[in-house]
Image (cartoon, helix red, strand yellow):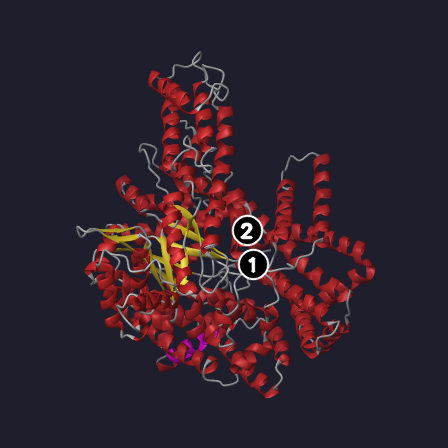
Amino acid sequence: MTETQDQNVQLRSDVKKLGSILGEVLKKHGGEELFQKVEDIRELTKGLRDNYDAAKYTQLKDEISKLESPMRQQVIRAFAIYFHLVNIAEQNHRIRRSQFYRLDRDSDVQKHSIQEAILALKADKHSEEKIQEIIDDLSIELIMTAHPTEATKRTVLEIQKRISTILQKLDHPMLPYKKRRNLEESLINEVTVLWQTDELRHRKPTVLDEVKNGLYYFDQTLFDVLPAVHQELEDQLNDYYPDKTWKVPNFLNFGSWIGGDRDGNPFVTPEVTWETLKLQRGLALRKYDEALTDLMKRFSQSTTRVSISPEFVTHVEEQERKYLTGKEKWQVEGEVFRRMFAVILKRLRQVEAKSKHAYDHAEELLRDLMMIEDTAKAHQLEGTKLKKLNKVIRQVRLFGFHLATLDVRNHSGEHQIAVSEMLKVVGIEEDYASLEEEKKQEVLEKVLKDPRPLMLLNEDYSKETQEIFEVFKMIQKAHKEFGRRSIEVYLISMTQSASDLLEVLVLAKEAGIYRLHVDGTVESNLNVAPLLETVDDLIAGPKIMQTLFDMDLYRSHIKERGEHQEIMLGYSDGSKDGGTLTANWKLFKAQQEIHNMARDYNIGLKFFHGRGGSLGRGGGPLNNSIMSQPAETLGDGVKITEQGEVLSSRYMLGDIAFRNLEQAASALIQSTSKVHHEQEKVTGLKPEWENAIEKISAYSLKKYQSLVFGDPDFLTYFKQTTPLNELRELNIGSRPMSRKGSEKFEDLRAIPWVFAWTQCRQMIPAWYASGSGFANLVEEDEKHMDTLKEMYLEWPFFRSTVNNLQMALMKADLMTAKEYVNLVEDKEIGERIFGDISAEYDRTRKFLLEISGAKELLDFSPNIQESVYRRNPYVDPMNFLQVDLIQKLRATGEDEHTEELLTEVLLTISGVAAGLLNTG
């Protein structure tokens, strides 16, 4: 038995236990016939995985084809629910392993932990002053988005959470027999409820539904976990450097797009964004109320037992007179802390009502709490801290009254239309949109240098222009109501020129968010950030930013924003247009070039990485994402989107959320320390590495585009061999699948593009054309293979890229994928294109194994490797059923069977998503 297998004994025990319970549930609700049918299909697929046999393969397809409803639907649900149970067991095992490392500080140090990062600093002999500098430079911002890739609905997620909690309790070694029996009965009941729950949504979620789903994670885990990660860093620093007083800044923050992302979503109106901000504030206030009520119970110290400073007592008396009536005051005079908490709670509960007694902003609450801390710590034993109070103080610093900074995003074309109309109405420019770029910049600069407003209030502007202007008026109003941290960044999708950013400044000027005062000074209260998405935009990015940095007017805006510029990088559209390998390299290179250029202007950057959950959209472990960035950019701070199913897999359970964020913090500490190392200068890549990756990228791009854009039958193959059209009926997001409702490839969003390929197990966006890139390089000169091996060993970006490609090939499965080729009406098209995909798969696999020196894919991560092996035999039936059902659905007209067939197709889509742990 290998070490990994030995570690996973308990995991396999949990999977077996949950599988057995599911089996009994199947017998209860479907009889022995259902149970036996599921077992027969499972045994056939498992046997095919162990040893392929053509006769068994035919038998399996025949078994599936003969299934009819309601039995067929029950079989689909049985496999789907099995995946949910496996996912729970694996998450529980991850918690178990993490807790094992925390039993004793002197036991083995867990990889990618904060403890490991601090020990690495100590081993590198950094001075305490240098370590404080490194800590001060840390910045991670994670942004929740509502991208529709969470196929599991909230009710099911909550059942999963309850099952996970029961499994954790059953792990307790001193559990009395009766409690164990009760927990096992509860486990059976929860699995039963899971079976009895409808897993499909019957309507598309509204934007506010999505907002509430996002808030669920703040409520359940993040409000407590974020302070815990900061505390862990402080504790580890104190453990290993006990003679220094450490200051850990708020280096880890969460923001959100949900309710602010207008790009392509007509349902995100200014009113919806305003309601989002109110919901966020409401949650923050409720969480503070709960925490402060608890603190009030704990702070029972009395002046009859301890000597409280007269200054604090006087302050409490003044606050009571100002804010409380006689009945509202705490009645025990000597319990001064409780008296002060009574004042705090009264003022906090008035915030939403905007009463004259309410806190105007979170900083006032923070000052009151810190005054309590300063007074109370004088009576603490040496070396102890008021951690409960410290936690609330950290929460107020992190979440304020806004909870999470909300980014607003819109498409550059929307701004151009609005500005064009405004300029035409006031007689400045008849047809702004048709101007050359330089002339556009000239016109916009002139408008921005004029302190007078541009819009005529009595003019009838188009509905679209009025709505755009209402967005900016809402932002200005939000700054007054919720504070400027409520909305700090305005993102511009499809940024292609400097004028795209200047247009947003013009609109901000009209709303009073950007102002040029008569004395020439500038006031700017909003970061304007370009989103570089396509391969062409990434290449053009450095020039766009240099053009802006050379403008005195834009430099004045940057100066007002603290000499800080945010730039978002899109991982989805670049990959869709140019393939994953080319897109990732262009992203890496764009960061380097923009960073170096901005450094010459003394401008600080923050790169915002628009990564998806799936590999085809830049997904992968959060810590790997950080480590693979250009080292010189990490001191600028890291901002990353957390999308779709990633939210539930990473943040539904507190222990998993802590571990995920700890890994991210550890990666950033170690990467930032390299930038700070006094003996190590970041010199960039070796020339031979850069030359190699440039050539690989060029070859890969040519291969990718020859298929996706060069083959006239490719779109037909894509639409027919994948469940793209059926996905439209899976109610998992408020946003349409395509921009403008178009059927064009360029208007199809990257999410359904990746989702559809994942379902049919071809996963083209995550790996296709990489093998050709490697092969063509090595064909030039066989010595290039040695260079590739060196790059894998020494360059984190390349190692992460190769490892993600391995993951993609492991989750793809051409035996299963071949079944989907039967959905293509023209057999010649299907066989020809699938033949090309198969050849490229084999080519890519060969080079990945040679470059990494592995015998099998994912040898570098045996736990994930075992997880994929564990799942594949159970995903296969879902795929076979999906193909069979899609054939039947597409062959029927609008008859009585259509809705039933569609429901079953959607159940297979949800099941495959659960089985692969990736959607879009």
Residue 564 visible? The answer is: yes
Residue corresponding to mark 1:
150
* SS for callout 1: loop
Between 380 and 107, the residue placed more toward the observer is: 380
Q: Is residue 684 above or below residue 192?
A: below
> Percent from the top left, x then y, of residue 182?
72, 38
Q: Are marks 1 and 2 in contact (CB under 8 Å)?
A: yes
Q: Residue at (21%, 51%) from the top-left corner? A: 517
Q: In this picture, is 663 found above or below 862?
A: above
* Residue 769 part of the magenta-drawn span: yes
- The magenta span reads 768-778
Left or right: 646 as drawn, with respect to 499:
right
Locate residue 683, reporting x and y percent.
Answer: 25, 61
Location of the N terminus (image quadrant): bottom right
Residue lying farthest right?
A: 32
On residue 213, the disc is 2
Secondary structure mostly taken by the magenta-highlighted segment of the chain: helix
Tag 1: amino acid = Glu
The extreme left residue here reads 519
- Helix, strand or loop at label 2? It is helix
Q: Residues within 10 Å of mark 1 (few under 14, many from 20)?
A: many
Tell me where residue 326 appears, x and y as whole percent: 48, 18
Within 10 angstroms of label 2, few (less than 14), some, or many (20 or more) residues?
some
Q: Earlier in the sequence, mark 1 or mark 2?
A: 1
Q: Which of the two discs, 1 and 2, sits closer to the camera?
A: 2
Kindly identify the amino acid type of the residue bearing the numbered disc 2. Asn
In the image, residue 448 lies in the stretch drawn in magenta = no
Give above or below for 857 relative to 451. below
